[in-house]
Image (spheres, rainbow, N blue to C red):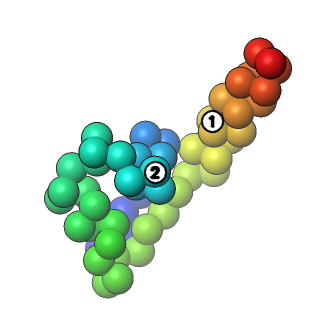
């Protein structure tokens, strides 16, 4: 199965957040699934990171 993660699901997975359901985590962890992340998600995270840096 192909899974396209949205930005929140990706962040929650990589930070081991409890906000990601057990089902979601299980699907991502399943090695038979192809995990995809949109370039728009990468762009969104970069923009938010830059905004945080500019606040300092």
Q: Secondary structure at mark 2?
A: loop
> Is residue 9 visible in the rendered structure shown here?
no
Q: Quadrant of residue 53?
A: top right
Q: Residue furthest front?
A: 56
The answer to whether residue 55 is above or below residue 16 is: above
For image coordinates 23% across by 67% down, the residue present is 26
Q: Residues within 10 Å of mark 1 (few under 14, many from 20)?
A: few
Camera-side residue of 11 and 44: 11
User: Where is residue 12 drawn, in percent x and y?
Assistant: 40, 47
Classify 13 as above or below 49: below
Instruction: Give me the disc on residue 15.
Output: 2
Can residue 21 be seen here?
yes
- Say if mark 1 contacts mark 2, CB within 8 Å: no
Q: Residue 23: where, in percent of width, then height?
A: 17, 59
Q: For the residue labelled by badge 1, is the local secondary structure a helix, a strand or a loop?
A: helix
Q: Earlier in the sequence, mark 1 or mark 2?
A: 2
Residue that label 1 marks: 44
């Amino acid at each position: 199965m192909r899974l396209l993660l949205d930005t929140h699901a990706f962040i929650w997975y990589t930070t081991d957040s409890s906000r990601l359901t057990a089902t979601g985590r299980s699907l991502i962890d399943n090695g038979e699934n192809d995990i995809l992340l949109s370039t728009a998600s990468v762009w969104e995270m970069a923009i938010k990171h830059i905004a945080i840096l500019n606040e300092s």
